[in-house]
Image (cartoon, rainbow, N blue to C red):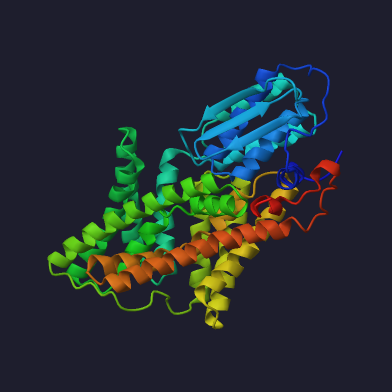
């Protein structure tokens, strides 16, 4: 049996097999229940997709489950909200098709890690079908590793450390902490009443902007923009953006489009919430300055500590396992150090972002391969310090004050940095595939996947 991770083996099968499921060898009737195997694969895929896993990895996991239980003529199909899996016993038999609708999404990387380990055990033949069902049920029932109050505190600490990272002092950090906690509490209140997520983000973004306006009005002599920037870090949908770009780069265009549309709505919600409060402040006579750069003077010890703290608290926010927390803190320090060295050395921020996140993506993939689990718990917290909060604030401030040219330029800059971040993570992932030897490809896997997009 191949010693390669199941992700590598099955990604290669997805990318190189032009007739997936059709040219698989016909076998005798499987000894297990076909509907139960399909259901197990669909439920596993649903859990992975709801946790933010890329569409390609979801399809690979479903193929791993069906192959392990003898259903090799299966064709998976993943979109943003629907997962379909079809099994055709032979070319003359009618296919058996099942699907599940993914309606609820929750960020819990502990469950994601457990689901990856389950697929790993299934693909190595160590788990029976019934045992796999019981383990999957246990994974879905497991409570989050961190209590609600700690997650709320982590939200505030993400904002506080982010504000320090962009030049804020102790007063600004405390204000950002308070704003993020209030905003998250208000958003959770709307969520419990079934209010759409867009309005949750609008309300969650308002306290940071309101406090910033208040600090300017009271003339505290602090950097109020850092309050808003810090408050945005806990709201920016970096996880969804990385998954969207990865889906687009691997050919899952429908899923990528849907994820990007989700990101677009969430960011518009943030823009609306902040812009409303900035407009109110402007009407009250608060002097809001749209000029200037939001890259603070270099202070390596403080910035490294803030970057590590941001990634550490962000890791708590996305519910990673306890032993991953120190790795997340180290990853945040590494990503910020690479970015700052390149930026101070004269590199454009977009290039610096691509290089920094590419290194983080590569290291995260290697750690995930060593542990036979997902790379997301290692990568997503580590890229937290590089999220484009300052550029987004500058764009929103420009639009709120009527400086449309500067506003749109700031938002385009933020979008460029966000895409560079996601592309860098994906690039690191692809480079990691070359660290280990490539899987051997047989006759039915010789056609290159790239030819599917050339009109043949």
Determine which quarter of the picture holds residue 397: bottom left
Residue 223 visible somewhere in the drawing: no
**Image spot of residue 43 (x, y percent):** 59, 28
Look at 73% across and 39% down and name the residue there. 19
| In the displayed structure image, the side of residue 8 where residue 406 appears, left or right | left
Look at 48% across and 79% down and name the residue there. 298
Above or below — where is 366 with respect to 164? above
Q: How many marks?
A: 0
Residue 156 visible somewhere in the drawing: yes
| In the displayed structure image, the side of residue 180 where residue 318 appears, left or right | right
Give the residue furthest to the bottom. 346
Q: Which one is in front, 17 or 412?
A: 17
- Quarter holding the N terminus is top right
| In the displayed structure image, the side of residue 287 where residue 450 appears, left or right | right
**Image spot of residue 152 (x, y percent):** 40, 46
Give the residue furthest to the left. 284
**Image spot of residue 73 (x, y percent):** 74, 29
Q: Which one is in front, 183 or 203?
A: 203
Above or below — where is 410 with respect to 266? below
Q: Which one is in front, 19 or 86?
A: 19
**Image spot of residue 130 (x, y percent):** 70, 19
Q: Which one is in front, 7 or 336?
A: 7
């Amino acid at each position: 049996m191949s010693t390669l991770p199941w992700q590598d083996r099955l990604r290669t099968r997805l990318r190189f097999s032009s007739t997936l499921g059709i040219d698989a060898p016909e076998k005798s009737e499987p000894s297990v229940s076909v509907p139960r195997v399909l259901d197990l694969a669909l439920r596993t895929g649903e859990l992975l997709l709801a946790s933010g896993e890329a569409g390609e990895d979801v399809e690979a996991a479903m193929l791993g489950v069906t192959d392990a239980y003898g259903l090799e003529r299966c064709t998976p199909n993943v979109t943003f909200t629907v997962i379909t899996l079809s099994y055709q016993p032979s070319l003359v038999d009618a296919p058996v098709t099942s699907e599940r609708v993914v309606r609820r999404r929750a960020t819990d990387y502990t469950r994601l890690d457990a689901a990856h380990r389950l697929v790993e055990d299934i693909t190595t033949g160590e788990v029976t079908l019934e045992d796999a069902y019981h383990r999957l049920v246990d994974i879905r029932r497991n409570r989050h590793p961190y209590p609600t109050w700690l997650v709320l505190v982590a939200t505030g600490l993400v904002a506080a450390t982010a504000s320090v990272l962009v030049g804020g002092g102790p007063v600004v950090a405390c204000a950002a902490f308070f704003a993020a906690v209030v905003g998250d509490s208000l958003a959770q209140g709307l969520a419990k009443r079934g209010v759409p997520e867009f309005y949750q983000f609008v309300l969650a973004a308002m306290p940071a902007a309101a406090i910033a306006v208040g600090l300017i009005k009271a003339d505290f002599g602090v950097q109020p923009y850092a309050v808003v920037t810090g408050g945005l870090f806990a709201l920016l949908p970096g996880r969804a953006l990385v998954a969207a770009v990865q889906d687009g780069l691997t050919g899952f265009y429908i899923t990528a489009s849907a994820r990007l549309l989700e990101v677009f709505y969430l960011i518009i919600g943030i823009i609306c919430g902040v812009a409303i409060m900035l407009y109110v402040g402007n009407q009250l006579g608060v002097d809001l300055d749209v000029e200037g750069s939001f890259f603070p003077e270099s202070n390596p010890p403080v910035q490294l500590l803030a970057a590590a703290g941001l990634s550490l608290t962000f890791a708590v926010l996305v519910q990673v396992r306890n032993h991953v927390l120190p790795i997340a803190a180290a990853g945040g320090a590494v990503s910020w150090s690479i970015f700052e060295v390149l930026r101070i050395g004269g590199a454009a921020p977009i290039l610096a972002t691509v290089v920094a996140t590419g290194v983080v993506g590569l290291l995260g993939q290697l750690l995930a391969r060593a542990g036979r689990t997902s790379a997301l718990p290692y990568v997503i917290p580590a890229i937290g310090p590089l999220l484009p909060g300052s550029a987004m604030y500058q764009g929103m401030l420009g639009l709120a004050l009527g400086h449309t040219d500067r506003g749109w330029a700031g938002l385009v800059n933020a979008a460029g940095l966000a895409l560079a971040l996601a592309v860098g993570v994906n690039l690191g992932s692809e480079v990691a595939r070359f660290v280990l030897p490539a899987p051997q490809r047989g006759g039915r896997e010789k056609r290159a996947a790239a030819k599917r997009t050339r009109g043949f």
